[in-house]
Amino acid sequence: MEVRKTYKLFVNGEFVRSESGRAYRPDGLVNVPRGSRKDLRDAVRAARTAFSGWAGRTAMNRGQILYRAAEMLDGRAAQFVELLGGGARARRELDQSVETLVWYAGWTDKIGQVTGNVNPVAGPYFNFTIPEPTGVVAIVAPEEPALVGLVRRVAPALCGGNVVVALAAESHPLPALTFAEILATSDFPAGVVNIVSGQRKELLPWLATHMDINAIDVAACTSDEMKTVEAAAADNVKRVIKTRSEEHSPHLITAFMEMKTVWHPIGV
Amino acid sequence: MATALSLTHLGSLMRGVRSVDEVGADERAASLAKRSIKKSSKLWALDLAIRCMDLTTLEGQDTPGKVAAMCAKAIRPKPGDSTIPSVAAVCVYPLRIADCVEHLHGSTVRIASVATAFPSGQSFTSIKVAETEEAVRAGAQEIDMVIDRGAFLSGDYQRVYDEIVAVKEACGQAHLKVILETGELGTYDAIRRASILAMAAGADFIKTSTGKVQPAATLPVSLVMMESIRDFVRETGRPVGFKAAGGIRTAKQAISYLVVAYETLGSDWMTPERLRLGASTLLNDVLMQIDKERTGAYQSPDYFTID
Amino acid sequence: MAITKKQSTALAKQVFEYAPAPEAIDHIKIQPRYGLFVGGRMVAAHSKKRFPTINPATEDKLSEIVEADEVDVDRAVTSAGKAFDSWARLSPSRRARYLFRISRIIQERSRELAVVETMDGGKPIKESRDVDIPLAAAHFFYYAGWADKLEWAFPNRKPSPIGVAGQVIPWNFPLLMLAWKIAPALAAGNTVVLKPAETTPLSAMVFAEICMQAELPPGVVNIITGAGKTGSLLVSHPEVKKVAFTGSTEVGKHIQRAIAGSGKHLTLELGGKAANIVFEDAPLDQAVEGIVNGIYFNQGHVCCAGSRLLVQESIAEPLLEKLKRRLSTLRLGNPLDKNTDIGAINSRAQLEKIQGLVESGIEEGADLYQPECDIPTRGFWFPPTLFTNVSQSYRIAREEIFGPVLSVLTFRTPAEAVEKANNTPYGLSAGIWTDKGSRILWMAERMRAGVVWANTFNRFDPSSPFGGYKESGYGREGGLHGLLPYVELN
């Protein structure tokens, strides 16, 4: 007889039950925690606390940790393929997920070089522009594909030094919650990535209005949801990221980043 | 005379002098140079420029005749026009002091002499002191000394300081202007440091340049020196004068120095007792500008005597 | 002419007030009333509503302006829509040439533009002459060069224009903000409908003439005038695909809500409450200039103004003494006088807002300092103002005043400076003054702000991206990054 796993939310580096004590059964048999607004609140608080540390890591170090996640995921490939329904399609999704992590792992120490500049201003000043993480990013994972869909949004956000609160696919939360185990064993500091499962309709407005979230990724949302989020996001001028990108893109990294420009006189 | 500080750690004190951001100082000076001075203010400023002028000749070929002519110009810059004031002083080499004594007798024009192995300052302190004493004895009322830039740049602040103290003492009643030769100091930081050092050692005036080194006086250098004066006055309560010298040839330039002095040091410095412009060819341009303001017509140099 | 020292000093005070040096205005022709610039020419408006635009320094009416209505907005957007295809398809080097041409005409007409800007907005002529207009021309020149090099800006992508851009700009830098909006939009192949602020429409009207002089194809640039309602109609127009707004955070949020779900692209450049941080080892005299430039430039009508001075406690006293002395040399008065440092407040409404916030500062317990200065009897004026003993919680330390009002706070350690500087919903700019290189970089890294000026302040350049973090908005204007909001990347 197998020893079944209790699926939990991943908040502040720990696997926790929803504070609400609620669960739902999207796949019929398995109980999945139905996260609440308070779980999101805790996740955002954990993320904010982790932000300066993660953003302050060297780009090289962030790259190594993302690569470590790829290693962990690839090492548990069989389990994920099974979780994704088995077969060639599942295998492809797993491979794509690993590939995405590897790709962004290599970007951490290049994005500043490719998208930053030294600007030739007309005067005796040294002036440079560099991308910096925007802060706490909320990500709404698409329902399908449940694993790579999440990875393709979370990886670029982390790559740029952001911290993440992700909402797992409501109808297929298990890949996301299991992916949290990969994150938990890849040396991400506690709070850098948080994954909450639950009902999007219930949770999305809390993310959209949260004053300590700097950006929200709604590419996976319906147009009605997008409209609501965009309007609510105005309360703290959240960046609303709508870029649909099936593929990897450095523009998706910078979508979660701010350009900072620094001036200094040149003199003796 | 000002109290000579006996400081065992002058070097470290000097390195503690606040720094100057070059670009910021340049921009501030440039913005002040854009002040637009018109009509009554312009005429007053031109008059002040003459009253603050040290009419200068510092050439190997200076003769009694040349100096006599300059003295006449100094007393009466524009013959026949009594509204034009005399200049503040004439500035000559020590051997020409006697000529000045002869030709300036009875006038308000003061006699300034360079000394201390001008312009390089590369000689023995005893010689510099002796030269100063001789110059004062010969009739100099003001001494324009040079600092030992070699000592300053090598970090021997004590030597520079002691020498100024010694020369100041040799001056007796004569006023001491200390030339920093800013064109050789390299940075505004060093200029500020040298300014503070000279003032602490007892300078009555600090002066930009000998006129023998390029760049000579510039507006931002003057700004930095005036800001040093401002801070020194705040610390000690002793007002110190400022003299710009070298390269000031046009009335427009002269006015911009007055503007910087006014906005940096205030109206108390708008007097020859605290502000001087050392120049050899500036005077005629100022006279031409005065006539232009008075007549409304642009002037020709042919109508202004070259002495 | 024997003048005693006392007389001389008195004379200096009097004379170095500088005789008036007003910029000539006889070459300026402001029309008594303006229409709208639609389809390449000035047209009569559908709207019958007009409002006066006044000189805030004299309260004299300068001209009458249309308050464009829904029909006017629709006509302008339609005109831009019609022009879009051919402008987008025009050979990029041609687009570049039009922009170069506009830049040159701005240079040629620079004095006229400077005077109009100063009369309509109240800013000192030395600023419009030396900052606003040259930078506006430079901005067009910079983006002109990008028009045929877009593939180099976005490697591996095919950048294409978005469509009609609806642009709404503020009254603090009217022509410069116009340039920031129009230049990158046109370079990338978009067409635009721009609405200048209701108190400063005149330089945009001159710009309309410049477009005609440049023989810019009709409809590529359309300029409509009006107040908030017109702006709201513009950004909500369904054919507007890209919205760019510079102005208050409050209105920015309103726009974000209004166009939610529409699929329009949006960039916002909003308010700020920047910290200007002075460490004990700073070059103090230049820091004082930077502080003055940071908050009293353009009467403090600057979104990136250094309105919070954070000074290290150990040098607070000498710094404030220098600063107060410097304030006494600022010359407030006729904006057209070349020696004026502080011009008129842009409008009565803005003056009242400043007055209200300053009163709140006094009530909350801060100490007010204002140098002696003569306030003209007509027009809107506010003297340079400095508050000491300010706490982070005071309104004057938290709210954007958009006036010549500086709040001084102290700190003890770099970490405390960072904490206080970032303790605001805004994040547009920051200033750092210190002689220590590694500290500059350490501080710059920690400032949650889009523009960091170290040992300088309020510097702008077309090649330098500008824009905010947090509630100061999103998107960048200027530089390569300023192109991004105006392209689709396929």
Image (spheres, coloured by chain):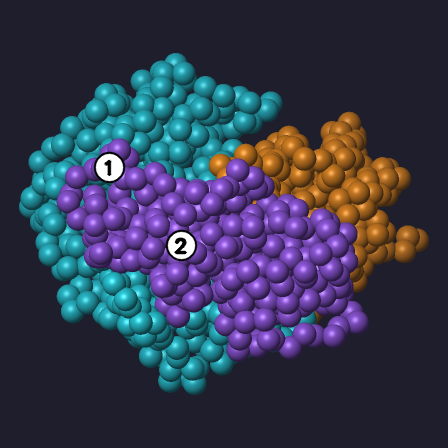
Chain coloured cyan here: C
Q: Quadrant of the N terminus of chain B?
A: bottom right
Q: Nearer the viewer, residue B243 or B99?
A: B99
Residue kind at label 1, given as amino acid type: Tyr
Residue that appears at 9% across and 36% down = C44
Residue kind at label 2, given as amino acid type: His
Neighbourhood count class around disc 2 (C-alpha, 10 Å): few under 14, some 14–19, many 20 upward = some
List the residue tagged with mark 2.
Answer: B103
Chain coloured purple here: B
Expressed as whole percent of the image width and height from the top left, the position of residue C132 reads: 34, 44
Residue that appears at 21% across and 52% down = B81
Picture disc at residue B303: 1
Q: Does B269 sit left or right of C157 as displayed?
A: left
Residue that appears at 52% across and 50% down = B96
Chain coloured orange here: A
Q: Residue furthest right?
A: A1
Q: Residue furthest top?
A: C91
Neighbourhood count class around disc 1 (C-alpha, 10 Å): few under 14, some 14–19, many 20 upward = few
Classify mark 1: helix, strand or loop.
Answer: helix
Q: Nearer the viewer, mark 1 or mark 2?
A: 2
Q: Does B278 sit left or right of C233 as displayed?
A: right
Q: Note whether C87 is above or below C225 in the view shown.
A: above
Whether residue C268 is visible: no
Chain for mark 2? B
Q: What is the spatial separation of the Cα atoms under label 1 and label 2, in whole angstroms? A: 24 Å
Expressed as whole percent of the image width and height from the top left, the position of residue C355 reads: 29, 73
Chain for mark 1? B
User: Which quadrant of the structure image shows residue C84?
Assistant: top left
Q: Does B184 sit left or right of C121 as displayed?
A: right
Expressed as whole percent of the image width and height from the top left, the position of residue C60 reads: 11, 56
